[in-house]
Image (spheres, rainbow, N blue to C red):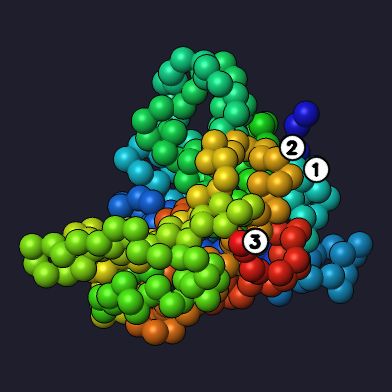
């Protein structure tokens, strides 16, 4: 099946297509890219010509020329470029399986016009991102693989999708993004964080603790439940922070990482593109619980939250995770 027919020009239709819903305005694709790649730059910025000029000819009298969007070209990694945006309407989005009224699409291909050299066929066709089933004959490798992984992560972040090689749809579930990490300037002791975790899982406790040579604390907290798995919090001082923080003032975050992760009853299901119904229900509850823990921790020591896709998590996103209707499961308490 051909998707986005008439939307993506023929010369770009065979690239990997990233579709970003623009329901609340255009998504800053360069910010998403900068969270994964070091050398992002517009080689030619996109532009829009306002349709204020009247169209000539009797049959067009009184009609204004529609806005004209000229796609830009953005350098992405060492040898690839992203061309776009191309405007996508609701009907085309429905074909791909994306629930949105409007979106912007970007085609990613090698800057030299050649095709990437790919590896062997996948030995398994089930992975969280769906990349194996999208490339059944030969898997991307090297920079192309990283670009495809970034596109899937960006699609999950925004509720969008990807067309691998311009034809194979990948529409990741945004609710599959659960884990969060807080980077802050203050180091809390286990006794400061444990009550926050116990407010969600009463049986939570310290499972590991040590003092590093520089005197900063390093410890792990964990709270297990009977049905929903466990929440694990790892705290330590780090030498490197996620690339997404690089564009921020250094005073807004710090070197202490508070990594909050969910460990389901069956960890293998984390690697599946389509997990079981019980996994999805537990994930919805723990996703909300982790968001509550992250908000409580951030309100105590400030800092910046980063999601498991490597992108900055906004307050609006955290509110959405706390929504009792999100994820298909009521409430935000784990089963203990």
In this view, the residue farthest toward the front is 203
The CA distance from mark 1 to mark 3 is: 38 Å
Residue 135 in percent (x, y) is at 57, 24
Are circles 1 and 3 on residues that touch, CB within 8 Å?
A: no
In this view, the residue farthest toward the left is 213
Which residue corresponds to mark 3?
A: 335
Residue under the image location 87 percent in, 64 percent down: 60
Note whether residue 170 is visible.
Answer: yes
Above or below — where is 74 with respect to 57? above
Note whether residue 50 is visible.
Answer: no
The CA distance from mark 1 to mark 2 is: 7 Å
Question: Which secondary structure lies at badge 1?
Answer: helix
Looking at the image, residue 243 sits to the left or right of residue 322; the answer is left
Q: Residues within 10 Å of mark 1 (few under 14, many from 20)?
A: some
Residue under the image location 60 percent in, 24 percent down: 125
Are circles 1 and 2 on residues that touch, CB within 8 Å?
A: yes
For marks 1 and 3, the one nearer the N-term is 1
Which residue corresponds to mark 2?
A: 3
Which residue corresponds to mark 1?
A: 95
Question: Which secondary structure lies at badge 2?
Answer: loop
Question: Which secondary structure lies at badge 3?
Answer: loop
Quadrant in the rendering for residue 7: top right
The front one of 141 and 272 is: 272
């Amino acid at each position: 099946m051909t998707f986005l027919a008439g939307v993506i020009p023929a010369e770009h239709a065979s690239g990997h297509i990233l579709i970003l819903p623009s329901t609340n305005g255009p998504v800053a694709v360069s910010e998403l890219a900068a969270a994964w790649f070091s050398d992002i730059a517009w080689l030619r910025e996109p532009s829009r010509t306002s349709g204020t000029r009247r169209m000539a000819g009797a049959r067009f009298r009184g009609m204004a020329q529609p806005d004209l969007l000229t796609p830009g070209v953005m350098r992405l990694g060492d040898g690839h470029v992203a061309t776009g945006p191309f405007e996508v309407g609701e009907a085309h989005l429905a074909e791909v399986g994306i629930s949105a009224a409007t979106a912007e699409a970007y085609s990613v291909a090698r800057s030299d016009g050649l095709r990437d050299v790919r590896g062997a066929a996948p030995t398994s066709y089930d992975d969280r991102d769906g990349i194996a089933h999208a490339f059944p004959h030969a898997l991307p490798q090297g920079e192309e693989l990283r670009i495809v992984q970034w596109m899937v992560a960006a699609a999950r972040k925004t509720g969008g999708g990807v067309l691998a090689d311009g034809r194979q749809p990948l529409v990741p579930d945004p609710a599959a993004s659960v884990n969060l990490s807080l980077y802050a300037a203050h180091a809390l002791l286990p006794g400061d964080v444990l009550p926050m975790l116990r407010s969600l899982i009463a049986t939570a406790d310290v499972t590991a603790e040590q003092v590093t040579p520089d005197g900063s604390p390093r410890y792990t907290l964990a709270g297990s439940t009977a049905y929903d798995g466990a929440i694990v919090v790892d705290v330590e001082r780090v030498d490197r922070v996620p690339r997404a923080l690089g564009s921020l003032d250094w005073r807004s975050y710090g070197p202490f990482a508070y990594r909050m992760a969910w460990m389901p009853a069956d960890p293998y299901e984390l690697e599946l593109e389509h997990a079981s119904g019980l996994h999805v229900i537990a994930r919805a509850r723990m996703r909300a619980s982790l968001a509550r823990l992250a908000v409580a921790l951030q309100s105590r020591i400030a800092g910046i939250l980063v999601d498991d896709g490597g992108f900055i998590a906004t307050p609006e996103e955290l509110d959405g995770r706390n929504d009792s209707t999100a994820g298909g499961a009521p409430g935000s308490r784990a089963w203990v």
